Amino acid sequence: MLAILSPAKNFQQIPFPAGSPMMTKPRFLEKTTQLIEQMQKYFPDELSDLMNMSSRLGEENYIRFQNFLDATECGHAALLSYKGEAFKGVGAESFSEEDLCYAQQTIRILSGLYGVLCPLDEIKPYRLEMQTQFHSGTVRSLYHFWRADLTNAIKEAVQASPGDFALIHVASQEYAKALDLKTLKVHFPVIQIHFKEEKEGKLRVVSTYAKRARGLFIRYLVQNRVHHISELQNFVADGYSFCPDLSTKTDYLFIR
């Protein structure tokens, strides 16, 4: 069983814990280099416009892209590099060596720049969201650039993962659209996880809370070595619990 998660926009540098497994290399570095070479053609103000960010972030990411292929600059493990609500929920800095090894088999992070990442893949800070309106040559969008490769990579990862053959969709729609889910569903179940808040009898998604809950769910999968679909419903954290009445075989709803 494999779970997919979205990346975060921000980064942190957490030292690799002593005794941790060795970092690994992202699978699609050649395609990442293609994207970097295109992004290096943009000036700071153009990057700001392209990704709707401040001039400060445009300058910061211009420098990142220009220096990205410098082999002397080391990266950090993906699961420990992203800084956001979901990754706070994951709390990978407290994982044991056994947790990290299990995560390496069962978790994948989707990325606009790297395509797909294993938790221990070495990455450098960047900013390139999957929905960025990127055009280059025959590439119409990052979705078009990545879809075939990512779909095949996720299919292989599910088939190589321990436990039930199933894909657990804990990613945002922005990133899940990079996969051909219709094709994947031919081979195994795809179960999407939802988190909602109940207030005054109504259910709604609160983005910040939902992101953190996704991370907590990933943490639950790793630390409990969840192998079977039937175990997903046992997740309880931060007041969330499974709602069977509003769930289906392919959409699991957790509310609080």
Image: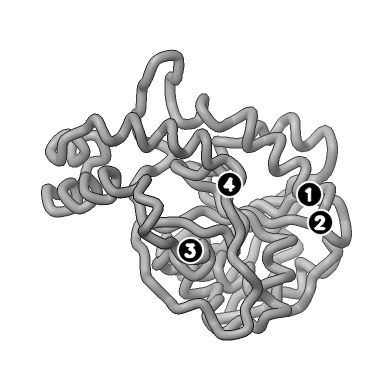
Q: Secondary structure at mark 4?
A: strand
Element class at badge 1: helix
Q: CA distance from mark 1 to mark 2?
A: 5 Å
Instruction: Kindly check if marks 1 and 4 are in contact, taking CB atoms under 8 A apart as contact.
Output: no
Asked if the residue at tag 4 contacts the one at tag 2, i.e. Cβ–Cβ closer than 8 Å, the answer is no
Q: Position of residue 16 (x, y in %)?
A: 51, 77
Residue occupied by mark 1: 158
Quadrant of residue 238 in the image?
bottom right
Q: Gap between marks 2 and 4, in whole Å?
A: 15 Å
The numbered mark at residue 161 is 2
Residue at x-position 66% and y-position 31%? 180
Tell me the SS state at disc 2.
loop
Q: Amino acid at mark 1?
A: Val
Q: CA distance from mark 1 to mark 4?
A: 13 Å
Relative to 32, 55 lies left or right: left
Q: CA distance from mark 3 to mark 2?
A: 24 Å
The residue that appears at 36% across and 64% down in the rendered structure is: 11
Residue under label 3: 211
Q: Position of residue 164 (x, y in %)?
A: 88, 57
At horizontal 62% and vertical 56% (from top left) the residue drawn is 118
In-front residue for pair 178/250: 178
Label ID, residue 116 = 4
From mark 1 to mark 3, how far is it between C-alphas?
Answer: 23 Å
